[in-house]
Image (spheres, rainbow, N blue to C red):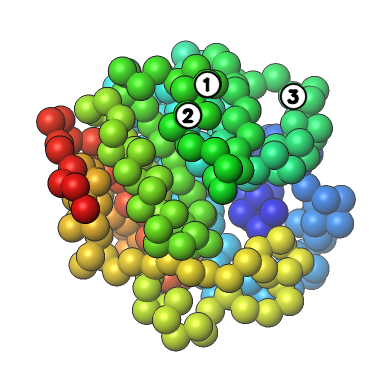
Amino acid sequence: MGAAWCRLVEQAQPPRYRQFNDPVVGGLLDPMLTMMAQMGPMRDQLLAALGPGTYGAQVMRTRYIDDVVSDRVEAGISQLVILGAGLDTRAYRMASLAATTVFDVDRPGTQRYKLKKLRRTPPRARDVRFVPTDFNLHSLGEVLTAAGLDHQRPVMFVWEGVTQYLTEAAVRSTLSLVGESAPGSTIVLTYILRRVIADGSWGEGDVRDLLGSSEPWRFGLEPTQLRAFLGEFGLELVEDVGEAEYQARYLNPIWRQLPVNHIERVAVATVLPGFTRLAG
């Protein structure tokens, strides 16, 4: 809900400054949140309550991930797996996915809500396959195979706003699956800085309950650890971006002033050919 609400607020920006178009997101949200996005004082109060730079971080990670997905699709990848998809709308708003099959993976309850809200909305993707999954009961690889994922062809994985809520064991399990994908497969994932989680000073309070993100943060990484950590799963780090890169790449060229916090980063990695994981 929180990420979707930030996307909705961004739609009110003038086209010159808007980082992406999401005409679908408003229909996914509770009417109260939709109203708050449209009313200046209430909107500004909630934006402030989110924490300094949180809105900017949400918006800019969406823009960056959109660009990565479009680049990989244009390069020939035609399978997109969105892990912990939540209220992700890419399959319904990105024209670049016209030749792509999208696998929307999430908990059954979340997907029922999303399907109900989207029942009259045609996708922009060639095909959208909802994959309800309880990770305590099902193997991610098995449910994706059952949904028709072709493991012999490259896959684009999106893992946005999820890893901080998982245990390290769960993160490792998912990255192991990604690392077993066909060479050329790519993952783009967000991660919270480990030191932020360790000191427990961020992301608490009533606003997280309001926006449906009251789950505790468990997992984090530091940029200096990232390359080695991903390498354990046969993944080669391609790019690791955050506030400085967003400012230089997207905001400075259009003279937009948008504070972005430093606590979350986005990494892109590709599957190495011929990687063999050592036992243990």
Say which of 218 and 123 sits in front: 218
Say which of 236 and 172 sits in front: 172
Position above or below: 256 against 270: below
Say which of 232 and 77 sits in front: 232
Residue drawn at x 29%, y 69% as measured from the top left? 222
Q: Position of residue 90 (x, y in %)?
A: 56, 33
Position above or below: 128 against 224: above
Give the SS element for disc 2: helix
Density class for disc 3 (Cα within 10 Å; few <14, some 14-19, many ≥20) is few
Number of marks: 3
| Distance between mark 1 and mark 3 Cα atoms | 25 Å
Give the SS element for disc 3: loop
Residue drawn at x 71%, y 72% as measured from the top left? 207
Q: Position of residue 29 (x, y in %)?
A: 78, 47
Q: Position of residue 186 (x, y in %)?
A: 31, 35
Residue drawn at x 27%, y 25% as measured from the top left? 182
| Distance between mark 3 and mark 2 Cα atoms | 29 Å
**Mark 2: amino acid:** Glu
245 vs 17, left or right, is left
Residue located beneath label 2 in the image:
142
Residue located beneath label 3 in the image:
121
Density class for disc 2 (Cα within 10 Å; few <14, some 14-19, many ≥20) is few
Q: Which is more N-terminal, label 2 or label 3?
A: 3
**Mark 1: amino acid:** Ala
* Residue 84 visible in the shown view: no
Residue located beneath label 1 in the image:
146
Position above or below: 69 against 154: below
